[in-house]
């Protein structure tokens, strides 16, 4: 067992570089390779967090490799379409609004009003919505 230090690329409050300590049992790998593997693994973890949170997929619907592949591709396509339609990165609220619309719980006017609000927020990033309270 050995400990490898991996810098995150961020700085703490004191301006010092943040680092993670990883305990590994691969004694034949160089520290740089361990750090690179961890970064790749972390990217995969972030993707699945995005997939579950933003797209509302708590559980995968299929168990076969083809079914999982189709579900992941569909989720990414939906996210890209929402981004194109809304004019900014998809959020959980935008995804929910689309789900409400397709379920019949929201009208087309409500969906379009939500998208228009997103476009206004993109044009004026520092402004607060009028109904924020």
Image (tube, rainbow, N blue to C red):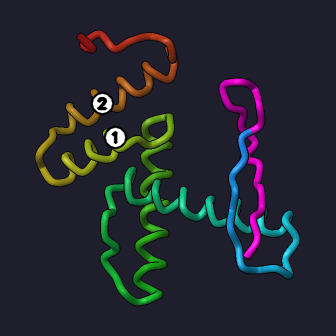
Q: Is residue 57 magenta?
A: no
Q: Residue furthest left?
A: 105
Quadrant (top left, top right, bottom left, bottom right) of the N terminus: bottom right
Q: Is there CB contact under 8 Å for labels 1 and 2?
A: yes
Q: Residue furthest bottom?
A: 64
Of residue 124 and residue 38, the one placed in the foreground of this image is: 38
Q: Is residue 9 magenta?
A: yes
Q: At 24% from the left edge and 51% from the top edge, which residue is drawn?
A: 99
Where is residue 9 shown, x and y percent of the image? Answer: 76, 42
Where is residue 34 shown, x and y percent of the image? Answer: 78, 68
Vertical relation: 104 (above or below) 109? below
Say the numbered circle drawn on residue 94: 1
Q: At 39% from the left edge and 59% from the top edge, which residue is drawn?
A: 52
Quadrant (top left, top right, bottom left, bottom right) of the C terminus: top left
Span of residues in magenta = 1-17
Q: At 76% from the left edge and 54% from the top edge, which residue is drawn?
A: 6
- Chain-order first, disc 1 or disc 2: 1
| Label 1 residue SS | helix
- Total residue callouts: 2
Q: Is residue 112 left or right of residue 35?
A: left
Instruction: Report the mark closest to the observer, 1 or 2.
Output: 1
Q: Is disc 2 surrounded by few (<14), some (14 to 19) or many (20+) residues within 10 Å?
A: some
Q: Is residue 85 left or right of residue 34?
A: left
Name the image quarter holding residue 3: bottom right
Q: At 59% from the left edge and 64% from the top edge, which residue is drawn?
A: 44
Q: Main secondary structure of the magenta part?
A: strand
Where is residue 92 shown, x and y percent of the image? Answer: 35, 44
Q: Residue furthest front?
A: 1
Q: CA distance from mark 1 to mark 2?
A: 8 Å
Per the image, the residue denoted by label 2 is 114
């Amino acid at each position: 067992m050995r400990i490898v230090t991996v810098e995150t690329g961020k700085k703490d409050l004191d301006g010092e570089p943040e680092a993670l300590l990883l305990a590994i049992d691969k004694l034949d790998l160089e520290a740089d390779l361990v750090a690179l593997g961890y970064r790749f693994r972390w990217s995969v973890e972030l993707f699945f967090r995005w997939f579950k949170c933003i797209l509302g997929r708590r559980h995968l619907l299929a168990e076969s490799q083809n079914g999982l592949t189709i579900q992941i591709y569909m989720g990414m396509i939906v996210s890209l379409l929402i981004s194109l339609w809304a004019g900014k990165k998809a959020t959980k609220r935008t995804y929910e609004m689309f789900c409400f619309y397709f379920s019949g719980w929201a009208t087309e006017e409500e969906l379009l009003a939500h998208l228009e609000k997103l476009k206004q927020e993109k044009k004026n990033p520092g402004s607060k919505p009028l109904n924020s309270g």
